[in-house]
Amino acid sequence: MSMAGNLRKVTGLDRVGGLRKMARLARRRAKVDLSHPARSPLGSSVVNCVTYQNGARVTAGDDLLEAVEHVRKARDGFVWLGLHEPTEREFVGIADLFDLHPLAVEDAVHAHQRPKLERYGETLFAVFKTVCYVEHKELTATSEVVDTGEIMVFVGEDFVITVRHGRHGSLGPLREELEADPKQLGKGPAAVLHAIADHVVDSYVEVTDSVQQDIDQVETDVFAENGARADPGRIYQLKRELLEFKRAVAPLARPIQELAGRPLKVVDPEIQAYFRDVADHLLRVTEQIAAFDELLNSILQAHLAQVTVAQNEDMRKITAWAAMIAVPTMVCGLYGMNFEYMPELRWRFGYPMVIGVISVICLTLYRSFRRNGWL
């Protein structure tokens, strides 16, 4: 099946003359709308479109076709197109212009992918999971701790296309940092790919620091004086959120290692050294997440042990009081049988004697239980 046929299958646009006719119409009459800094109610998914040459910004206009033609004619520089949650229809002309594989286009549009790196011809397609810490005044059993999103990156010889999904992970500050370092940006699209990977992994480090504060607070509460009364739901919630965090971080190790060591045409060997640094940071984050998981398991076990100890203490107290109450109950039960002939029944001092005996026995039991720590 041809490339156009594959795109028809993915996008479902096999009508009104097919994909080729739609792409031609898009080229003739539709310029990319760059008037919105992010997705707006008007429906624009384009965040920015900039041309770079020798590490410097050349143009930032509203015509993607002219920018691509300029770069390809000069055979120097590249185009960086940023998108936010584009639809299939919005991606049609872009996919045709840059000859993007339909499977990669489908992943970029629909999102919900695992971190990965795939190569389609001379184009690399990378998926990164972004993670953001959700601020909260107090951790509860239903608190959201981490929020995830996605960044998909298409990297070719003369273009970079970033597709962002989610409420966070804006690449605007990253673009400004790269533009402030023309030497690094001049290394081409691979430099942008490295910057994105480094930016994502750095955000992981920030999230781990914030999550550690929540874990420290839970640990403090569990080992406090009334730790047995702490809500175990908070521990389970942290474990669930940590699992979501782990799903975003752990699968990224293999793609980063491939970028750091695997020969790739669009990745300069000098850039690969930078990816090795990113891989090192990612490994530290992965190890820290594993340590958090083990720590939460230990905290949960300690909390369950505290609950068991508290229950045992309660049972000992109940048993002690039941033993003391059993003495007068037994005596009163005997004298409550109303037999005519009972010891000391008609004796003047019988009642005080019985009360005294009961009191002495109960006091002895009380002192014994106190001495043994049951009361």
Image: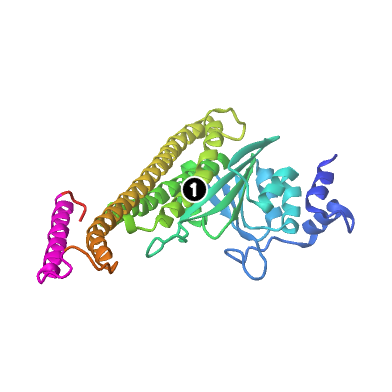
Membership of 293 in magenta stretch? no
- Where disc 1 sits, the SS reads helix
Q: What residue is at 82 percent from the left and 54 percent from the top?
A: 12
Coordinates of residue 319 in the picture (x, y in percent): 28, 55
Total marks shown come to 1
Amino acid type of disc 1? Phe
Q: Which residues are magenta?
A: 344-371
Membership of 354 in magenta stretch? yes
330, 308: nearer the viewer:
330
Coordinates of residue 130 in the picture (x, y in percent): 52, 50
245, 372: nearer the viewer:
372
Q: Would you say 303 lies left or right of 249 here? A: left
Q: Is residue 343 above or below residue 288?
A: below
Residue under pointer 1? 245
150, 61: nearer the viewer:
150
15, 364: nearer the viewer:
364
Q: Would you say the magenta stretch is mainly helix, strand or loop?
A: helix
- The quarter of the picture where residue 350 lies is bottom left
Q: What residue is at 45 percent from the left and 51 percent from the top?
A: 177
Q: What residue is at 57 percent from the left and 51 percent from the top?
A: 150
State the scheme by which the image is colored: rainbow
Please state, as top left, top right, bottom left or bottom right, where the N terminus lies in the image. Answer: top right
Please state, as top left, top right, bottom left or bottom right, where the C terminus lies in the image. Answer: bottom left
Q: Residues within 10 Å of mark 1 (few under 14, many from 20)?
A: many
Whether residue 179 is visible, yes or no, is: no
Q: Would you say 108 lies left or right of 5 here? A: left
